[in-house]
Image (tube, rainbow, N blue to C red):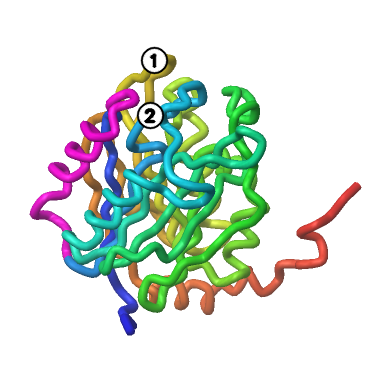
Amino acid sequence: MVTFRAMKAYLVQLDIVWRDKNANFEKVSQMLEGRVEPGSLVVLPEMFATGFDVESAGIVEGESGMLAETGAFLAGLAQNLKSYVQGSGITPAEGGKRQNLVVAYDPQGQAIGTYQKLHPFTFGGEHKRFEAGRGGILYPLGEFQVAPFICYDLRFPEVFRHAALAGAKVITVAANWPSARHAHWLPLLQARAIENQCYVLGVNRVGKDKHLSYCGQSVAFGPRGEQLALADEEECVLEVDLNLDAVEAWRKEFPALQDVRKEFLGLTY
């Protein structure tokens, strides 16, 4: 059993090739080649293999909740890097809809966590084609617990609070966050770190797709809300150190989470 309390995370910020999975698989492999320390966490953007495509049926793969070619790539990457790899893909759902998923794989290439985006992006038409998820997940990373979220979820702090109270010490946000709303990206991520006293890793794409341009600015915040690493608008891989002791020490020094009134998490008016 892996029991490490400190590890590295690698945030892969790429210019996604529109609807070309093989090109994106090759690009990710090249960006990571020779630089990942075994036992680390690699995080990829939302829909990293296709771009944010709510139209094409060709992006759908596998069975409900189970990635096919994207899953095979991520599993093989995890094995080759001897690390944990978290990526995103699209699978079918009931009623002809789709699922926008994050799946994490361990160094043996086994899937250890699958998360379905809770909040389809209505403004972008995602709700017409995609099924909303029904709950969050945590997956183990040594003694860490990781809670993954996807892009638009970032605007809904209540689900992040639930994750923290369930034991999350690292929260990831895989995104295709456009330049038009770049001013919201960093403040929201930093707020989630401050509120929940944990690491927050926001992994965005760069470049342009059929519809939009993207701001990059992949970032890591620590449990005190401190900025640990920040990308610009170019392709890159950010390397970040994660330490469980830092989370636990801050939560002990400033125990705000113990004052959460859980009865109000489902508050209605």
Query: Horizontal placement of 132 versus 43: left or right?
Result: right
* Residue assigned mark 2: 51
Are the residues tagged 2 and 1 within 8 Å (C-beta)? yes
Give how far across and how far down residue 139 sits, in percent: 46, 67
- Residue drawn at x 25%, y 64% is 83
Q: Residue 210 carries which label?
A: 1
Q: Is residue 79 magenta?
A: no
Q: In which quarter of the image is residue 53?
A: top left
How many other residues sit within 10 Å of disc 1, few (<14), some (14-19) or many (≥20)? few
- Across and down, in percent, residue 193 comes to 50, 56
**Label disc, if present, on residue 31 of the rendered structure:** none
Q: Image quadrant of residue 170?
A: bottom left
Crowd class of label 2 (few under 14; some 14 to 19; many from 20; radius 10 Å):
many
Query: Taking 253 as reference, is 134 above or below it?
Result: above
Q: In this view, does 236 lie above or below 256?
A: above
> Quick one: 49 or 11, which is closer to the camera?
49
Quarter of the image where the N terminus is located: bottom left
**Residue at 53% over, 48% down:** 64
Cα–Cα span, label 2 and label 1: 9 Å
Read off the magenta span. 17-37
Q: Which residue is drawn at 53% across and 73% down?
A: 251
Quick one: which residue is furthest to the right in this view?
269
Query: How far across and how far down the image is residue 130, in percent?
Result: 59, 34
| Nearer the observer, 98 or 247 | 98
Q: Say what secondary structure mark 1 lies in.
A: loop
Left or right: 122 as drawn, with respect to 213: right
Q: Name the residue at 51% across, 65% down.
A: 138
